[in-house]
Amino acid sequence: QVQLVESGGGLVQAGGSLTLSCAASGSIFSINAMGWHRQGPGKQRELVAIITKGGSTSYADSVKGRFTISWNNAKNTVVLQMISLKPEDTAVYYCKARAGLDYWGQGTQVTVSS
């Protein structure tokens, strides 16, 4: 079992920045990748960024160059740094850990005002 707790969401103006954190606990040794997904109003949940235990990263085209995902092994935390935020980035952001099964956090709201 893996437990995930997200933090760092909030309200920001367009062009601003936010940093989301996801702290993992439990069977963290079994995690081989972690990522962030988001679900905007009336939209399906989509992948935003993913990072493997080896450090490989992948991003959705819509966030490339603006979002950066990183993994702090010592703190068992994955961070998503977001800059140049746009209103279309407004969504609930979910952390996911892949450890055989997929585990999800409870989500954190990000709202970008125009």
Image: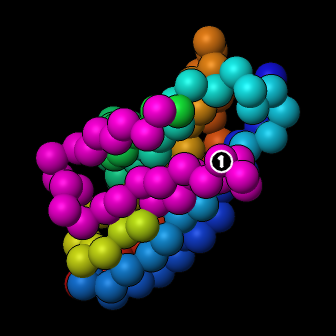
Q: Horizontally, is 108 left or right of 58 in the view?
A: right
Task: Tell me if residue 73 comes above or below residue 51 in the rendering.
Answer: below
Does 77 lie within the magenta span? yes
Q: Which residue is mark 1?
A: 73
In the picture, the quarter occupied by the N terminus is top right
Count of numbered tags: 1
User: How dense is the environment of label 1, judged by Cα within 10 Å: few (below 14), some, or many (20 and up)?
Assistant: few
Task: Tell me if residue 61 comes above or below residue 103 in the rendering.
Answer: below
Q: Secondary structure at mark 1?
A: helix
| Residue 108 on image: x %, y % | 58, 59
In the picture, the quarter occupied by the C terminus is bottom left
Magenta segment = 54-80
Which residue extends farthest top?
Answer: 100
Which residue shows up at 47% across the image and 80% down it? 11
Which residue extends farthest left?
Answer: 61
What colour-coding does the image apply? rainbow
| Residue 82 on image: x %, y % | 36, 69
Image quadrant in which you'd find residue 66: bottom left
| Residue 23 on image: x %, y % | 71, 51
In-front residue for pair 113/74: 74
Which residue shows up at 45% across the image and 76% down it? 18
Which residue shows up at 24% across the image and 77% down it? 84
Image quadrant in which you'd find residue 83: bottom left
Q: Is residue 81 visible?
A: yes
Q: Is residue 106 visible?
A: no
Q: Horizontally, is 64 left or right of 35 in the view?
A: left
| Residue 2 on image: x %, y % | 76, 30
Q: Horizontally, is 84 left or right of 49 in the view?
A: left
Mark 1 residue type: Asn
Q: Horizontally, is 109 left or right of 16 in the view?
A: right
Which residue shows up at 29% across the image and 39% down it? 58
Does 74 lie within the magenta span? yes
